[in-house]
Image (cartoon, coloured by chain):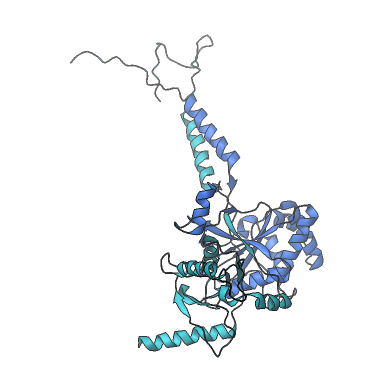
């Protein structure tokens, strides 16, 4: 065929597509929070409980070998906490090191290694070789540093205005004695109500919880 | 996106009098937008983690002794968590090493596991509390004592506490395993090992 096909412009106006893209982007920026840096991968066991993790909480992460890490999501209270710890334990932390603590992630070190850790760049802090916060069966504050941290964090939180809750994120394969030590440390320090982080599983059919759930909905 | 110039004389940006095209190709802008979206999808999370609330008994020796005497034998079940997700259980609180209770072993399965044992306990307590026997109060509830052994895992503890919630048991306690109970477990293991040979 000899006739030429009329050539039309293939130009599509991309303005609408651009608007959609930025609307989606704005949604994600406003509705989500950055995933917190985890010092170690922990696989929590599942349970039917669907209580959401409370906002202002102290998170104790326990890895499969029993190493304990500490994190607190209230930055103002964290500032009070590190000042208190620096004074009480004679760590002589500089304001920069204290700021590094407040903005930092979960950590697990004895008091005497804190200064060295806080001097390291934030990027390298993630790769740091953590040995875990010392915890033992004597539950004495000198050797059981976890108890000291928890007590100090609670009083820092109360000073700041919001009393924190304690949450424990432990791996399913951790042996019971390690978990028992953490729980006993808390009960010896007067904390008998805390939360265990679990992944959500469906309520099995035919059980009492299932019937109650049906009635409630 | 190719744009076909419809008017001829197409040199852009030449003399001042020429009308320049004001069309901007927005494709790179859209690419950028989607790249940022992908970044935020991978590094953020909308779902907050779920938790399970635990109330531990007050850690005082005196209170434990008093409470122990209050637990009625017919309402109680003791659950011992052992290695390899094994669950030993017996009815009542057996304090006497001389008369070992009938230790049964099971697992965390949906049928014929510990859940069925707990459901049976509940049914039995609800029947027996109304029969007017001495010490039986119509308000009695089943009580479960959970004693994890040294070789059990955290996942077992969470599973048994979950079973408490699934079956609607409101009175339970997580306590240390006693030497007496450890003796019961090793006796049962020895008996089973002997029977297997």
Task: Name the residue located 68 percent from the left edge and 75 percent from the top edge.
Answer: B67
The colour assigned to chain B within the rendered structure: cyan
Q: Position of residue A177 (x, y in %)?
A: 59, 75
Q: Nearer the viewer, residue A30 or B54?
A: B54
Location of residue B9 (image quadrant): top left
- Is residue A138 among the parts visible in the rendering? no
Camera-side residue: A50 or A109? A50
Compared with B68, A116 (above or below) is above
Q: Considering depth in this image, is A198 or A80 the residue closer to the camera?
A: A198
Residue B5 image offset from top left, x and y in percent: 40, 15
- Considering the image in quadrants, where does the C terminus of chain B appear? bottom left
| Coordinates of residue A48 in the picture (x, y in percent) | 52, 57
Q: Is residue B169 above or below residue B7?
A: below
Q: Residue furthest top?
A: B17
Q: Residue furthest bottom?
A: B98
- The hue of chain A in the figure is blue
Q: Report the quarter where the N terminus of chain B lies.
A: top left
Q: How many marks?
A: 0
Q: Is residue A111 left or right of residue A217?
A: right
Q: Residue furthest left?
A: A1
Q: Position of residue A7 (x, y in %)?
A: 32, 16
Q: Is residue B78 above or below residue A9?
A: below
Question: Residue drawn at (58%, 85%), measured in percent from left and top?
Answer: B179
Q: Is residue B64 visible?
A: yes
Q: Residue at x 51, y 12 (%)?
A: B15
């Amino acid at each position: 065929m000899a006739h030429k096909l009329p050539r039309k412009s293939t130009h599509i106006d991309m303005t609408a597509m651009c608007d959609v893209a930025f609307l989606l982007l704005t949604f994600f920026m406003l509705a989500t929070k950055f995933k917190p840096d985890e010092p170690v991968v922990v696989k929590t066991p599942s349970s039917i409980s669907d209580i959401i993790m409370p906002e202002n909480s102290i998170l104790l992460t326990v890895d499969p070998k029993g190493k304990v890490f500490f994190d607190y999501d209230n930055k103002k209270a964290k500032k009070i906490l590190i000042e208190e710890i620096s004074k009480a334990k004679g760590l002589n932390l500089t304001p920069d090191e204290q700021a590094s603590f407040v903005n930092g992630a979960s950590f697990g070190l004895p008091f005497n290694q804190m200064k060295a850790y806080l001097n390291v760049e934030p990027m390298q802090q993630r790769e740091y070789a953590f040995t875990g916060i010392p915890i033992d069966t004597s539950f004495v504050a000198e050797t059981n540093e976890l108890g000291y941290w928890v007590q100090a964090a609670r009083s820092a939180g109360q000073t700041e205005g919001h009393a924190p809750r304690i949450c424990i994120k432990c791996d399913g394969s951790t042996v019971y004695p390690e978990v028992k030590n953490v729980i006993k440390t808390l009960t010896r320090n007067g904390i008998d109500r805390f939360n265990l982080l679990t992944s959500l599983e469906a309520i099995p059919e035919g059980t009492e919880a299932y019937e109650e759930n049906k009635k409630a909905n | 996106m190719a744009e076909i110039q419809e008017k001829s004389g197409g040199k852009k940006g030449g003399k001042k009098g020429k009308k320049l095209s004001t069309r901007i190709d927005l494709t790179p802008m859209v690419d950028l937008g989607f790249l940022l979206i992908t970044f935020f999808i991978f590094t953020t999370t909308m779902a907050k983690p779920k938790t399970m609330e635990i109330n531990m008994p007050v850690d005082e020796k005196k209170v434990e002794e008093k409470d122990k005497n209050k637990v009625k034998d017919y309402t109680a079940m003791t659950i011992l968590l052992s290695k390899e997700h094994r669950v030993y259980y017996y009815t009542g609180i057996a304090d006497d090493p001389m008369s070992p209770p009938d230790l049964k072993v099971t697992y965390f399965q949906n049928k014929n596991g510990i859940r069925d044992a707990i459901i049976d306990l509940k049914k039995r307590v609800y029947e027996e509390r109304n029969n007017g026997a001495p010490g039986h109060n119509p308000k009695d509830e089943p009580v479960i004592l959970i004693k994890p052994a040294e070789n059990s895992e955290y996942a077992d503890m969470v599973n048994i506490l979950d079973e408490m919630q699934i079956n609607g048991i409101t009175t339970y306690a997580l306590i240390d395993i006693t030497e007496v109970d450890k003796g019961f477990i090793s006796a049962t293991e020895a008996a089973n090992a002997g029977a297997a040979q």
